[in-house]
Each structure stands twice: as structure tokens, then as C-alpha cells.
Image: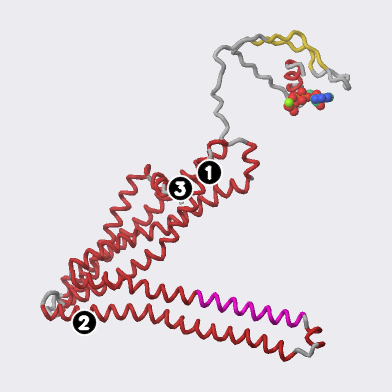
Amino acid sequence: MGTSTPRRLVALLSPERGRCAVVAALMVASVLGEVAVPYFTGRVTDWVASEDELAAAWPMALLGLSSAVTEFICDVTYAGTLSRALGRLQRCVFAAVLQRDVTSLQVTGTGAVMARVTGDVEATHAAVSEALSLLLWYLARGIFLLVTMAWLSPHLAFVTLLSLPILLLLPRGVGKVQQGLSRQVQEALAGATEVAVETFQAMATIRSFAHEAGATERYHQRLRRVYQLEGKDAAMYAATLWASGFSALALKMGLLCYGAQLVTAGTITTGDLVTFLIYQIQFTEAVEVLLHYYPNMTKAVGSSEKIFEFLDQEGQVAPAGTLAPDVLQGHLKLEDVWFSYPKHQEPILKGVSLELHPGEVLAVVAPPGAGKSTLVSVVLHL
Ligand SMILES: Nc1ncnc2c1ncn2[C@@H]1O[C@H](COP(=O)(O)OP(=O)(O)OP(=O)(O)O)[C@@H](O)[C@H]1O
Ligand SMILES: [Mg+2]
């Protein structure tokens, strides 16, 4: 994948700089609002004892509402900005197609050209608008959450960060093994079916050699292999569920135990701990989404790469027609020219007279079949 492709995609957005800044500002505002909600949840926890929970509940409700409104405006602006940028790309590709050599278009095929103009641009649009927005959103969220977590309790944030690789990689590793096993089960099943089909097709031969028991045993062997693999697959599936559930639970328990010690020591309040636990769940979710959607983003870059390749194929673009001789020479003069084709009596050109000096332009306008091409042929002595 060319390194310049992502840069060119970003360059597409450069005329939308103002709108992008608005989107970024709205996104930060919305994320801040979202991050503030758990903070006030913690404060409510702390203030329940002092019976002043309304003091924190009001800002929490207002922040939640304004964050939702900002997110909505941000989404609308983002979608509009992307549509404009990709619309521009689509116009570029269309213009590039029109500039091309007619023969090169015929060689490439209309289907392939249409795929560039509509298919690839749409694929890029779909992937970029979905994957990029999710990536940006969760990236901003993850960063803000991490910063707030570190501010609330550096110790607990450090523990969360340390456990992150286990939390994310353990279920992934187990999941990969399970996927491999599922594939093996499918292959073993296909093998068993193949044996059954082969056996039925060669039924006459098997009967004549009285090999029914042998053939049945062969099929059984294949089925036993399928059952074994299915058993392992089921165990691995359970392990996948356990791995994701257990590692998350283990982290929560660890944080609770360690957090309780910090509360007892007076380093943080109970409310801080509640806030932190909510942040931790949101942070892990953000990292999971980032890992999940990153491949989609690379797919989008791949689609756009094809578009840029198409735009770059300048060798095939017809010359712009700017070549002109420095000095124009010659003088064309027709006087009462008559012409008829050998096998036709009726003359096509009947007394044509014209005079053309160097640099002059003459338009010959006549209905189809009137003799325009014939006139040119006569001038060229063809
Ligand atoms: N080689 C040929 N032998 C006999 N008749 C011909 C030949 N070429 C053209 N014609 C006839 O001469 C007439 C004029 O043809 P020509 O191709 O010059 O017209 P044109 O004005 O160039 O038409 P178009 O607008 O369709 O290009 C037509 O009736 C056509 O059938
Ligand atoms: Mg003609």
C-alpha cells in the first residue's frame, strides 16, 4: 500500500479545512461531556451522604444532554463534509475518464471504468465515513478517558494500562485458535461427505468385493474425526467466552481490591473509585472498537488507492492539442468543382467554389450524405 495514499485522502479534505475544524471542536466538546457524566456520577456517590445529590445531578443531566446534542451536530457536519470531499473525487475521476483516449477506454473496458467512477469511490465513501468516524470518535474518547483516569488515580490508571494487553490479547488469541478449529471441523465434514459420495458411486464394485463393512468403517473413521474436532471446537468456544469474561472480571476485581485500599488510605474517595470503574469499562470498550475497526480503515485506503492509480495513468491521456506550427503556409482555392462517384450518375458536388488563406477557418455545414466528406477527399486528391 502506497504511503502517499492516506496523505492524498487527507489532502482531499483540505478545501474543507474550516468544516473539519468545526467537526474536531464539536467532537472534543461532545467527548468532554461524555467523560464528565461518570465524573458527576462519582460526585453524586460522594454527596449522597451529605444529602446534596441534586447539586451534582443537575450538571450531570445538563452535560449528558448537551453532549448528545453536540454529537448529533458533529455527526451531521462530518457526514456532509465527507460527502462533499468524495463528491469532488468522483467528479475528478469522471473528468479524467472524459480526457482519456477513446481507444484506451475501449481497451480498459467500460465496466472497469464504471467500477472506478462509482464502485471504488462509493466503497471508499462507505468505509471512510463509517470506519474513520468511529476511529476518530473512539480515539478521542480513549485519550480523554485515559487522561481523566490518570488524573483521578495514577495508580489505578497504571494497573488498567498494564492489564490491557492481557485483556485484549488473551480473548483474541483463544478466538484465533477457535477459528482454526472451526475451519478444521468444516474440512473434516467435507471429507466425510466426500467418502460417502465416493462409496455410493462405487456401490456395484463394493458389493461385488463384499466390502460393505470396510466401506462403513472408513466412513465411521471420518465421522469420529469430525466428532473429535467438534468436541475440541466446543471446548475452545467455551474458553473464548471464559477468556473474555474472566479477564475483564479479573481486572475489575483487581481494581476494586486495590481501589478499596486506596479509599481506606484516604488517597481517593469512594466516588472517585466509582467514576474510575465506569471510565475503565468505557476505556476498554474504546480500545476494543479501535482494534476492531482499524482493518476496515486500511480497506478504505486500499479502495482509494485504485482510484488514485487510475487518476495517475497520465500516459494514456490524449494530448491537449496545444501543438501549432509557428508559420502557417499554403492557399486553397476551389473554382466551380463538380464531382460524381464513378458508378453514380448524379453529381455529389455541384459547382463548389471556395477560397481559404493561411490561418482561416471554414465550417462546412450540410445534412448527412450531402457530400462534406467527399469535398475533403477531393481536396486531398483521394
Ligand atoms: N465511395 C463512394 N462511392 C459511391 N458513393 C459514395 C461513396 N462515398 C460516399 N458516397 C455517396 O456520396 C454521398 C455523399 O457522401 P459523403 O460521405 O460525402 O456525405 P457527408 O456529407 O460526409 O455525410 P455525413 O454527414 O453522413 O458524413 C452519399 O450519398 C454517399 O452515399
Ligand atoms: Mg462525412
Q: Please state the total of marks drawn on the protein image.
A: 3
The amino acid beneath tag 3 is Leu
Between circles 3 and 2, the one closer to the viewer is 2
Residue 370 at least partly seen: no
Identify the residue position indicated by label 1 in the image: 310
Q: Position of residue 39 (x, y in %)?
A: 21, 69
Sequence-earlier tag: 1 or 3: 3
Which label belongs to residue 257? 2
From the viewer's perspective, tell me whether residue 381 is left or right of residue 313. right
Q: Give, as a single range, the part of the protein colored magenta.
A: 180-201
Which label belongs to residue 299? none
| Closer-to-camera residue (125/330) | 330
Element type at mark 3 = helix
Q: Is residue 213 above or below residue 284?
A: below
Residue 29 within the magenta-colored segment of the rendering = no
Assess whether mark 2 and mark 3 are in contact (beta carbons under 8 angstroms). no
Identify the residue position indicated by label 3 in the image: 86
Q: Where, quadrant-wise, is the C terminus in this rendering?
A: top right
Q: Is residue 332 above or below residue 175?
A: above
